[in-house]
Amino acid sequence: MLKRLIQISCFFLFAVVLGVVWFAWYASGPLLMPMNLDAPSSEVQELLAQKEGGKHLVFQSIQAVSKDGVEVEGLLVSTPDNCQFSPTQNRVRDTLKLRGKLPHLERKEELVVICTSWDDGQEVALPMAESLAGAGYTCLIWNTRGKDNVRQYCSYGLVEYADVSALLDEIEKKQGNLPPVAVVGRGFGSAVLFKAAAHDARIRCVVSIDGFPSLKTIAMRDMEMSLGSPLSFIGYWLLDAGVEMRAGYTTFDVAPVDDALKLDYPVMVVCTDEYFFSTIEDNVAIYDSLKNEKKSLVEAIHEGEDFQAKEKIFTRIVEGKKGQKFEKNYKVKLYSGDDELQAGIAEWIYENTRMPMPKVLNNDSVSFFYQ
């Protein structure tokens, strides 16, 4: 009888251990291999497959070897001479003309690095590159999984950030110099480019769309939504263990808000209110961590709000060191529709990537410094 009880106990313990390992593996899967935010259209896939460009866009291939030894493939996207603009480009250009903040819509020297998705990086980033190319910019998009998708797991910038410097080095080598660089990231891409900007001083300004403060924040929120509050901590602990077991890092290691702390140049923080992992509170946390006063907080206009409104005040409840609570107000700029957002990004890049103007100090010996 005792032997039978021991056998049953051992079998039960084995089943529990097996269940724990399975859950850790299962729960970490969507985090390590995230689905695309937006599936690329057949038109985008066909255009990229040709790699020849056409009436609206031209492509130039760029290849480089990243810090981890993985070969990465990039594309420089621009408009051809005598371009016939696409409907998307025409809408953005018309919006820019109505706003009147961009001096011209001809070709500009600025290079815009775009990252939006871990999988199918070029395909998913192309629509944004198309819009900004229509405003005159040359854009760089790339496959963050590496050539032939050799990177098995997503690291949310811990590895992928080095691709940016490698590709910029290659462009500089080919062209002899590097134009002013801006970066535009969305979701996963926001985390990648915050880390890249924190490590590469050649980047002059950042646009973060639907960013998140830390991967732990997302993982905990996902567990609360899936399992409820009582079980969420256990679920998160197992998920985190699965991430470390499979990919060699933890959710604590991914914290874009910490990378944002290291930046001292202009950052535009955008919340589209489309995803659970990026609320206005999440974006405010990133905004608060930025040192440079040249920063902007932008949000989509909600249904039922005044579509003519340009700004609103967002109030956040902040807890002090002694437990006291007080209100902190933020001025939020508003946009309506993707065309207006793309136009605002184009204006922000132009305004914040130009060379700083020298300023004269009033003293006996005239000297100059850059702002």
Image (cartoon, rainbow, N blue to C red):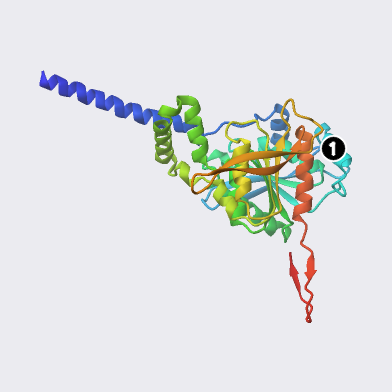
Q: How many marks?
A: 1
Is residue 31 found left or right of 187 in the rendered image? left
Seen in the picture, residue 108 relative to 301 is either above or below; the reply is below
Three-letter amino acid code of the residue under disc 1: Thr
Using the image as rendered, state which of residue 19 and residue 66 is in the foreground: 19
Residue 303, located in which quarter of the rendered image? Answer: top right
Q: Quadrant of the C terminus?
A: bottom right
Q: Can residue 84 be seen in the rendering of this structure?
A: no
Q: Quadrant of the N terminus?
A: top left
Residue name at image x 45 percent, y 33 percent: 28
Seen in the picture, residue 247 relative to 226 is either above or below; the reply is below
Residue corresponding to mark 1? 95
Residue 188, located in which quarter of the rendered image? Answer: top right
Residue 191, located in which quarter of the rendered image? Answer: top right
Residue name at image x 79 percent, y 30 percent: 307
Using the image as rendered, state which of residue 306 and residue 233 is in the foreground: 306
**Extreme-bottom residue of the structure:** 364
Q: Position of residue 19 (x, y in %)?
A: 34, 26
Using the image as rendered, state which of residue 151 and residue 114 is in the foreground: 114
Q: Can residue 229 be seen in the rendering of this structure?
A: yes
Q: Position of residue 112 (x, y in %)?
A: 72, 48
Seen in the picture, residue 51 relative to 291 is either above or below; the reply is above
Q: Position of residue 215 (x, y in %)?
A: 51, 40
**Extreme-top residue of the structure:** 1
Is residue 25 found left or right of 41 in the rendered image? left
Residue name at image x 49 percent, y 44 percent: 323
Q: Position of residue 99 (x, y in %)?
A: 86, 41
Mark 1 secondary-structure assignment = helix
Residue name at image x 16 percent, y 24 percent: 6
Q: Residues within 10 Å of mark 1 (few under 14, many from 20)?
A: some
